Amino acid sequence: MNTGLLLHTLLGLLLLLIPAGALYVLERKMLQSFAVAVGRMVAQLLVLCLIVWGLIKVDNTWLSLAWLLVMSGISAFIVLKRCKLDIRKLMLPTSAGLFMGVFLIGLWLLGLVLPVRIFDPRWFVPVMALLLGHATAMIIRGLSTYVSALHTDQQQYEFLRGNGLTHLKALLPFLRQSLLAILSPTIANLTTLGLTAMPLLLCGLFLGGMTPVNAFLTMLHMTIGCIAVSIVTLAITLFLADKALFGKRGSGPVSR
C-alpha cells in the first residue's frame, strides 16, 4: 500500500468520527456496540473482497458452485435466526430452497437472457449474489408471515381440513399472506429503487464498458429476476420445509 492510498484510507475512516461523536454526546453506551459492528463490517468486507478476487482469478465452475452453496447456507442461518425458527429442523430445507431458487433464476438470466458464459465468475458471482441477497431479505418476510399466520389461525387450518379440503388447499389462505408479505414491499419499493440502488449498479456497468442500451436492459432483467427469485425461493422452501413445519403431513402445524 503506497503512501497516497494510505492517506486517502485514513481520511475516509475519519468520517467515522461523526457517528462516534454523536454517540459519545448522546448515547455513550452504544459506542462499544458501534465499534464492534464497524470492525465486523470491515472484516467481512475484506474477506468478501478476497473471496471474489480468488473466484475470478481461479475461474473454476465447481469452486463457484461451492461458493453459492456456502453462501446459501449462511443466508439460511440468517433467515432462521431472524424468524426465530428451529435451525436444526429447517436449516436443510431453507438452504436448499435458497440455493435452488437462486441457481434456477440465475441460470435463466445468465444462459438465456443476457446471455454470457454461465459460470464466468465475473458474471456468475455478482448476478447470484444480487439474487441471493434479495431472496434472503424477502424470504425472511415470507417465511415469518407464513409461520406466524399458521400459529395464529391454526383453528382455521383445522376447520378447512375437517371440511374435506386437502392439505394444500387448506394452506392457500396462509400462502396468500406469505406471498403478499414479499410482493407488497417489492411493489412499493420499485419506484424508489430506480433513484437509489440502480444508479450505483449502472455506474458499474458503464465502467465495465457497456453501452447505455445494454446497461438498461441488463438492469431491467436483473430487477425482474429479483422479483421472480423471491417467489420461486419461497415456494421451494415452503415445499421442502412442509414436513418440518407440520410433522406428519396434514396433522397440523408444530410449535416453533
Image (tube, rainbow, N blue to C red):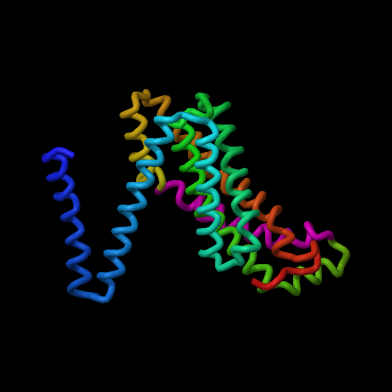
Left-right relation of 126 to 195: right
Dominant SS type (magenta): helix
Residue 180: in magenta span: yes
Of residues 125 and 149, which is closer to you in this image? Answer: 125
Q: Image quadrant for the C terminus?
A: bottom right
Of residues 193 and 123, which is closer to you in this image? Answer: 123
Looking at the image, which residue is at 39% across and 43% down? 194
The answer to whether any part of residue 217 appears in the image is no
The answer to whether any part of residue 224 appears in the image is yes
Q: Image quadrant for the N terminus?
A: top left
- Name above or below for residue 150 compared with residue 66: below
Looking at the image, which residue is at 37% across and 23% down? 211
Residue 195: in magenta span: no
Where does residue 47 sit, x and y in percent of width and height? 36, 47
Left-right relation of 125 to 197: right
Looking at the image, which residue is at 46% across and 32% down? 121
Residue numbers of the magenta segment = 166-192
In terms of image quadrants, where is residue 101? top right
Where does residue 129 sit, x and y in percent of width and height? 47, 42
Left-right relation of 160 to 17: right
Looking at the image, which residue is at 70% across and 62% down? 244
